Amino acid sequence: MEILLTIFGIAGAVVVLVTITQILGMLTQSKVSLKQYKPKGHKPDRMIRRIDYLHQWAKGNGFEFLEYYLVKTGFQRLFLAVWQRTDRPTFLCTYLVPTQSGFTKVTDIVTKFANNTSLTTANSSDAQTHPKPPKDYHQTFSRITLDEQWCRHIEMENFLMDVGDAKLVYTEIQFEKCFVNDVRKEIRYIRSISYWYLLGAYWYFIRRNLWHNKSIKTQHEKGMIKLPNEMSEDYPTAEDI
């Protein structure tokens, strides 16, 4: 889901602030949709073939396959494959993002906690392009294997629970509804920031690099974030904005 909100960051890469503003405005006004991906014809689908090897890894690490999706927002069309842990609301999400030379693969591992708290571990610095709503914790790392990404995710799950008093959610979560709501929540939060339309280049060129390759623990030690138990009960969340 993080890749959707880095679209304006890609625009920022060519230093066109007007374009960033237009794209963000379009995302805010457009409908975000998540539909099941149905291959055409009887031949093996090229999109599915690109991520087919992940099924074995997912099964070996306690994930069950949920669905293939086509994500639509504005002019963007992204292929998404999703798996979920069998014991808790932790999701493995792999995106295929169209590029001029083919596709870029981006993987997020996301865990949902109680009280609007979540943890995302991504393998792309683009997930750090924009500020996140309170209690939405993101860590990103470059050039790591999926095993390393999963290990770092588990470490910070334990950190948030042991040090931050985060509580896992054991109720059933509908992925489709959760996905769309989270994207809309982040867009609302971005637009709640004063002069957000002037900050695109700063976020892309500076913030993205400052936050990249820092674990949640490191972010906390540097005073970049507060843990759930350090926020007052009336601390605003994205849903309040």
Image (cartoon, helix red, strand yellow):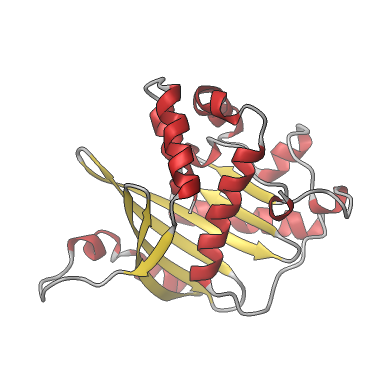
User: Which quarter of the figure has residue 195?
Assistant: top right
Is residue 109 among what the camera can see?
Answer: yes
Q: Is residue 47 above or below residue 126?
A: below
In the rendered structure, the answer to whether residue 44 lies left or right of residue 201 reads left
User: Furthest residue to the front?
Assistant: 29
In the rendered structure, the answer to whether residue 52 lies left or right of residue 93 reads left
Task: Say which residue appears at 40% left-offset and 64% top-offset.
Answer: 34
- Please state the horizontal and vertical placement of residue 67, each as a whole percent of the image: 38, 73
Is residue 142 among what the camera can see?
Answer: no
- Please state the horizontal and vertical placement of residue 9, each as a whole percent of the image: 45, 33
Task: Say which residue appears at 55% left-offset and 28% top-offset.
Answer: 197
Task: Say which residue appears at 76% left-offset and 63% top-offset.
Answer: 115
- Please state the horizontal and vertical placement of residue 43, each as a whole percent of the image: 10, 72
Query: Residue 76 versus residue 2: which sits nearer the camera?
Result: 76
Q: Is residue 50 above or below residue 210?
A: below
In the rendered structure, the answer to whether residue 157 lies left or right of residue 11 reads right
Total marks drawn?
Answer: 0
Task: Say which residue appears at 54% left-offset and 31% top-offset.
Answer: 208
- Please state the horizontal and vertical placement of residue 6, each as a whole percent of the image: 46, 40
In the rendered structure, the answer to whether residue 155 lies left or right of residue 80 reads right
User: Which quarter of the figure has residue 50?
Assistant: bottom left
